[in-house]
Amino acid sequence: MSIINLQSILYFGQAAAISYTFMMLSFISSIWGKGLIWGIFFLIYLLLGFTSNRITIIGLAFIFIFILQVYYFSKLRKGVKKYFLGLGIFVWSVLAKLHLLSGFNNWKIISGVKLSEDSIPYNLYINFDTPIIGIMLSAMLLPRFNKNLSLLKILSQSKYILILSILVITSFSVLLGFVKPDFKYPDFFVVWLMLNIITVVTEEIFYRGWLLNLFMDIFSRWVSIIIVSIIFGLLHFYGGALYVFLAIISSVFYSYIYVRTSSILSSILLHLLINIIHILFFTYPALA
């Protein structure tokens, strides 16, 4: 397996890599920054993404549509218009998640690598479509859904939930034959971690920070958790029925810890820990 590291990525695609760097800066500042600094970084991200041919004119048009949907959604309290816009946000996000929107040329940096003899081949992409979901929802909607708790306070409040969640999810994965213990340290782990953080934060902002709260305005807490978890699981259909089931179970824990702490940081932490444990200590992405 060839070594994939930051240096090689920068060498073979400087413009695209720099564009993605500004995307990450936009993401970080949309969550923890103040003012519109996230928007400046986002515009640079789009400009560099366009010049490097990772985002086309059609892609920019789709992004503009999504921005308008999120913006007007954020201005409405309730009513038919709000839920109609919510449906539009959901459809756009699902299409982006499945990479079905035209105008985005995601960058494949690892192709068909087997991390274990008995694992299925693994591909890794630098995506230019899905992070937009997290940035826009974070910048315009997240503050009303996020209780400001420190990481240490979250660990103190939810340490037992974290431990139980990890034990249950990993146990199910092994017992059902999805993975088996397999300690390793892939040479591209740092790159994988950087990209996975963006993926996890995007998913948690969408599923927990936005969609779960939207359903809890209509249904009870547990009904909303089940609905969101089923949606989360079904959108992992590409991994097969077993992967869908495990994703549903995982989502129940991600949703519960979010509701318990009222902080998106808690579900991000749990989700990221599960993914890190998976790649380092078990078959990745799954047994063949």
Image: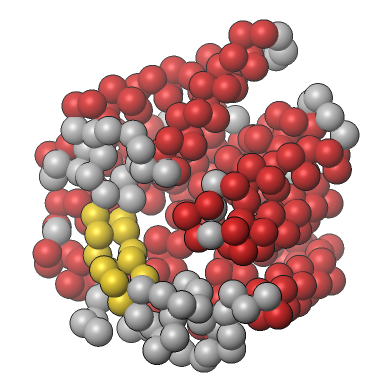
Q: Position of residue 173 (x, y in %)?
A: 66, 74
Nearer to the camera, 155 or 229: 229
Q: Position of residue 142 (x, y in %)?
A: 61, 36
Q: Position of residue 112 (x, y in %)?
A: 29, 72
Q: Position of residue 124 (x, y in %)?
A: 33, 64
Q: How is the image coloured?
A: secondary structure
Is residue 94 at least partly visible in the picture? Answer: yes
Q: Residue at x 24, y 65 (%)?
A: 109
Is residue 208 at least partly visible in the picture? Answer: no
Nearer to the camera, 231 or 216: 231
Position of the N terminus, as image quadrant, is bottom left
Q: Residue at x 12, y 64 (%)?
A: 12
Q: Residue at x 67, y 59 (%)?
A: 245
Instruction: Name the residue at the top extreme.
Output: 80
Total count of labels: 0
Horizontally, residue 100 falls left or right of residue 56, namely right
Measured along the vertical axis of the image, is residue 274 above or below residue 96? below
Specify the quadrant of the image occupied by residue 59. top left
Q: Residue at x 75, y 54 (%)?
A: 252
Measured along the vertical axis of the image, is residue 228 above or below residue 169? above
Nearer to the camera, 113 or 61: 113
Measured along the vertical axis of the image, is residue 144 above or below residue 199? above
Horizontally, residue 61 falls left or right of residue 197, namely left
